[in-house]
Image: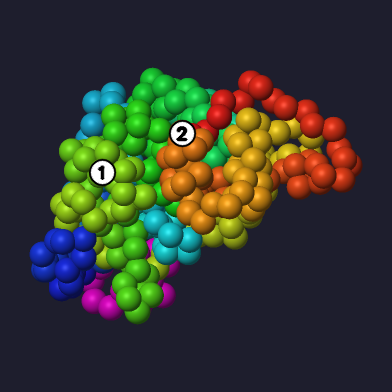
């Protein structure tokens, strides 16, 4: 009675699939998840139990993770998708299921520093959920530095046999080690042509490896290879949703402050972007590809340079309002 079927359309080349969704709740006395008897809304009102609607195949994947955690292994999964597509909702649903409703705000981290501190306090076999606000995902300039922090955190995750959920805008923003080797699978959240939320593509370990290689070359495309299968998910809010939203806001603030240029320093990548724009403006060149050939770089790199947000010190350079302070320690991003 707690199940219903959904027919999926063709997305990412996958075939139509008939799949079961499980409407379930956790019985604390029996210590297991059970199907909801009858109407789930009436059940929640009557019993006070929070129910979730979980894709059956995805449920089995999380059950497998539960098993390997008990055998002293760790597990990392990645959930990505566009802004407000519902990726955090899917991640929270999985976290709630994995924890058997014992999830608290301590299982959520606002950035890498917060994650490092919470990992130390969480017991072995716990879950840690890191949302998109922290910089390894949003700030290209700090990606290398933050990626190193993430790697250290994953080392601890392995030592403490934890379940680590990474939620971010793009799978391709992760370094290869995390994206390909450390993570078990990828859930790519998307919306249909009608902008309806609640859909995802599942990429297995092998598929996401191929996706990372091919997608990187095709400007972040998810079209090749085909996903293993498609799924749906429903709206879900944690009992401490207000606390979670405040934490997410903190994560955003951390990302913004971490990307600050108020120290007066600029990188070589900033200088290259400034010169690129200046040359395109002042030289008799009509195509970016022509300048790319002259500069011995790729057209893609110059397109990125054109979109790069320059620090104020460079935008004011002609007026001489500030002295250039070049940070030669930051590598050029090509």
Circle number at residue 214 = 1
- Specify whether 323 is left or right of 131: right
- Specify whether 222 is left or right of 175: left
Q: Which residue is mark 2?
A: 296
Is 291 placed above or below 121 here? below
**Residue 319 in view (yes/no):** yes
Instruction: State the SS at label 1.
Output: helix
- Specify whether 209 is left or right of 174: left
Which class describes the residues within 10 Å of circle 1: few (<14), some (14-19), or many (20+)?
some
Residue found at the very far front of the displayed protein? 284
Which class describes the residues within 10 Å of circle 2: few (<14), some (14-19), or many (20+)?
few
Q: Is residue 45 magenta?
A: yes
In the image, the segment drawn in magenta is: 36-51
**Residue 125 in view (yes/no):** no
Q: In the figure, residue 63 lies in which quadrant?
A: top left
- At horizontal 36% and vertical 50% (from top left) the residue drawn is 219
Q: In the figure, residue 197 lies in which quadrant?
A: bottom left
The location of residue 87, given as percent across then percent down, is: 40, 57
């Amino acid at each position: 009675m707690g199940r219903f079927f959904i027919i999926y359309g063709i997305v990412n080349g996958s075939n139509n699939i008939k799949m079961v969704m499980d409407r379930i709740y956790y019985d604390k006395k029996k210590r297991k998840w059970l199907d909801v008897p009858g109407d789930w809304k009436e059940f929640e009102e009557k019993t006070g139990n929070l129910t979730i609607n979980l894709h059956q195949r995805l449920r089995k994947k999380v059950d497998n993770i539960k098993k390997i955690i008990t055998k002293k292994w760790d597990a990392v999964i990645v959930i990505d998708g566009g802004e407000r597509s519902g990726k955090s909702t899917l991640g929270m649903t999985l976290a709630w299921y994995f924890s058997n409703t014992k999830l608290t705000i301590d299982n959520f981290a606002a950035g890498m520093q917060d994650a490092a501190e919470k990992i130390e306090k969480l017991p072995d076999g716990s879950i840690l959920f890191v949302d998109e606000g922290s910089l390894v995902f949003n700030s290209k300039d700090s990606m290398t530095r933050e990626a190193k922090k993430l790697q250290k955190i994953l080392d601890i995750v392995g030592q403490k046999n934890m379940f680590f959920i990474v939620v971010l805008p793009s799978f391709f923003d992760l370094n290869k080690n995390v994206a390909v080797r450390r993570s078990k699978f990828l859930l790519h959240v998307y919306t249909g042509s009608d902008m309806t939320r609640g859909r995802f593509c599942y990429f297995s370990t092998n598929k996401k490896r191929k996706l990372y290689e091919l997608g990187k070359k095709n400007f972040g495309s998810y079209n090749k290879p085909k996903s293993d299968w498609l799924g749906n998910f429903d709206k879900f809010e944690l009992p401490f949703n207000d606390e979670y939203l405040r934490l997410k806001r903190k994560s955003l603030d951390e990302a913004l402050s971490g990307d600050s240029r108020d120290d007066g320093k600029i990188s070589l990548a900033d200088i290259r972007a400034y010169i690129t724009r200046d040359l395109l403006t002042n030289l008799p060149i009509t195509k970016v590809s022509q300048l790319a050939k002259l500069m011995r770089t790729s057209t893609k790199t110059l397109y990125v340079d054109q979109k790069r947000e320059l620090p104020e010190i460079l935008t004011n350079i002609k007026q001489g309002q500030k002295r250039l302070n070049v940070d030669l320690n930051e590598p050029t991003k090509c």
